[in-house]
Image (cartoon, grey):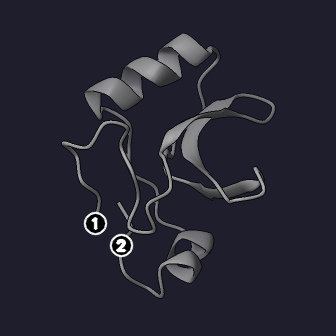
Amino acid sequence: MCDENANPLTCIKGLEIKVLKSNMHYIGTLDDDGSPMCRFSAEYYKTSDEARQALDELSFTRRTGVEIAFCSNGVPCF
């Protein structure tokens, strides 16, 4: 689970959930080395502003995936 009242929003491991970019923008976390850890949003966004709005409003579709289950021992991390 996450603390939806936390500022900044964090995952179960305490990593900040933020707007990230590969080819497009998405919502996810970085590990301690700054490498992508988990992607939370099912959507990709054309701009960082669109992704930021989705994060601020929690209006993105929460993605489930192998890496999310792996990093939290199968417990939903957001």
| Residue displayed at 81% across by 31% down | 23
Q: Position of residue 15 (x, y in %)?
A: 50, 56
Name which of mark 2 and mark 1 comes first in the sequence. 1
| Residue 72 horizontal/vertical position (percent) | 47, 79
- Viewer-nearest of discs 2 and 1: 1
**74 and 8: which one is in front?**
8
In the picture provided, is 9 more to the left or to the right than 33?
left
* Lateral position of residue 25 relative to residue 11, left or right: right
Nearer to the camera, 63 or 30 = 30
Disc 1 residue type (three-letter): Met
Contact between labelled residues 1 and 2, with CB atoms less than 8 Å apart: yes
Q: What's the amino acid at mark 2?
A: Pro
Q: Looking at the rendering, which quadrant does residue 54 occupy?
A: top left
Residue that badge 2 annotates: 76
For residue 47, which numbered disc appears in the image? none
Q: Residue furthest bottom?
A: 73
- For image coordinates 69% across by 59% down, the residue present is 32
Asked which quadrant contains residue 46, the reply is top right
As helix, strand or loop, the secondary structure at mark 2 comes to: loop
Label 2 crowd (10 A; few <14 / some 14-19 / many >=20): some
The answer to whether residue 44 is above or below residue 29 is above
42 vs 2, nearest the viewer? 2
**Quarter where residue 48 is shown:** top right
| Label 1 CA crowd tier, 10 Å (few <14, some 14–19, many 20+) | few
Asked if 66 appears above or below 36 in the picture, the reply is below
Give the quarter of the figure containing the C terminus: bottom left
Q: Position of residue 61 (x, y in %)?
A: 38, 44
Give the residue displayed 67% in from the left and 59% down from the top.
Answer: 31
Distance between mark 2 and mark 1 Cα atoms: 6 Å
List x then y, in percent, for residue 58. 29, 35
Residue at image mark 1? 1
Drawn side of residue 52 relative to residue 61, left or right = right
